[in-house]
Image: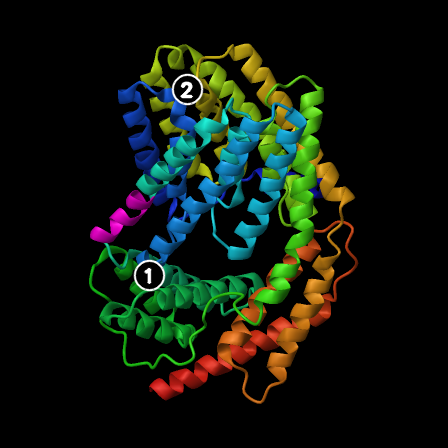
Amino acid sequence: MPNLLHPLRDALRLRAVKDLWHQRAVSVVVAVGIVEGVLLALGRLDLVLYAAGGGLCALYGHGLPYAARARTLALVVLGMAAGGAVALTTAALTDATAVRVAVASALAAAHKVVCDATRIGPPGNVIFTFVAASAAFVPQTPAQVPAHVGLMVLGGAVAWLVGMAPALVRPHGPERAAVVRALEARARVLASDGTTARARHEATAAVNAAWHTLRAAGPGAHRAGLERLLARADATGPAGARRLSAWARELRTARALPEDTGAAPVTEAPTGPLTAPFRGPSMRHLAPIGLRVGLGSAAAGWVSTALGVDRPYWAVVTAAAVLAANTTLSWQRALQRVLGNLLGVLLFTALVPFTATGAGALIVTALACNFAAEATIARNYWLASAFVTPMAMIMTEFAGLQPAGRLVADRWLDTVVGAAAGLVVCFAVPNRRAGRRVGTALDLLEDELAAPLPREPRLTAALLELREAADTASGEWWSGPLPEERITDAERRGHLALAVRRGGRSVTAA
């Protein structure tokens, strides 16, 4: 029995809070609150879906330096508007629910592939799919589409300004946060003598992400100081764990950089995880995942329609959200989604007496749910879903109050159908490329290790690619056995080679 309960406990357990949650939570509440407040003043809350859809772009890019964040947020807004334009045009041209479901599902598949390929980060493809799928079922005429897409762009512009506003107060905040995470991860490995393979991988990923963040920032004395600090941290031996922790605390609390950064040279810093030439194998494996999302979303929408739901967009969104990197994660996500949505429907029902009092109550409740969802998403997906669900249901109420009983019944039916359809398609469409990706990643790592002097950036990227590929393939229930001994040996030799390179850099600094 303990073995049977372990996966269930793992799927439902609450994790530690991440350090960026408050930035996303505050940003989305401010951005969406501004557009909803303006529409309330104009008496046009029926337009909330379009403007607030653009405002949700404020959730993205919080780990990026501000120069890179400006570009990324602009692309996110354009991507949101493009998906919304396709969905709204479909809604304007046809009343056929089956066609609308097909278009929303195709968009969901595209969102999944693009977001995974670009590694946009949380909240990933789900927000894009939620906005597009909702728009596909909104009554629309062709003449209204340009104005509604324009509202989405305006909401996105507000989100861009909100996302860039912290640069006025902490212009180097993202870079410092990335280095803090790297210092803390390295300190944990050093404190445990580096005996945990997972801890070594997490530290390598954190250090690599910090180098990538620093490279994305503009040149300057502050970046140079952070680079020296990170180079010293990367070359620090077991005795330096306390010093790394002290530097991390000082970076979090003080404006000035820690003084003891030394003069360690920054040589051949990694350029970020899975960059060329390693991007190829990581891109090719996304095709089966995109196919799963497209088929699962379409099946969910069509089944929900057959069961009597007039606007089955939530079934499409649920299937797209359930389908993760492999079958194991998809099963866990389905369990979390169903539990969270059930709690969310109960919460919405409890809030109906308050939200029915007026438009202001609807806005306050929606914003509170937005904030709570971002505050809890790092703890566990099911907990955040308990707040996302009433927020999404309230979005439909802005265009006009609907019978609460019918709304609750449709949402619960869509949830069950979407989760079930996603899982069925996940099992029916095997991801045979997952195993081949492991073999390719192993070959790349072993080729790099065979070089007379392994290049640290490529070696780091190869290690990260192998671990991600192995984790994904091991969660595919129908995949063949993995070469575990070869993977373990290659990772051990890779981390040893990295340690030798860091040691050499430390000697150079001395």
Residue 266, compared with residue 353, is above or below; it is below
Q: Please name the residue shown 45% across and 80% down the image.
A: 502
Q: Is residue 446 left or right of residue 80?
A: right
Q: Please name the residue shown 45% across and 40% down the image.
A: 81
Position of the N terminus by quadrant: top right
Give the camera-side residue of 219 and 52.
52
Q: Which residues are magenta?
A: 160-168
Q: Residues within 10 Å of mark 1 (few under 14, many from 20)?
A: many
Q: Residues within 10 Å of mark 2 (few under 14, many from 20)?
A: some
Residue 172, compared with residue 28, is above or below; it is below
Task: Residue 79: give x, y in percent of width and height.
Answer: 47, 46
Task: Residue 213: give x, y in percent of width and height.
Answer: 38, 63
Residue 162 within the segment the image draws in magenta: yes
Q: Residue 227 appears in which quarter of the rendering?
A: bottom left
Q: Earlier in the sequence, mark 2 or mark 1?
A: 1
- Provide the residue designation for mark 1: 175
Q: Please name the residue shown 44% across and 86% down the image.
A: 504
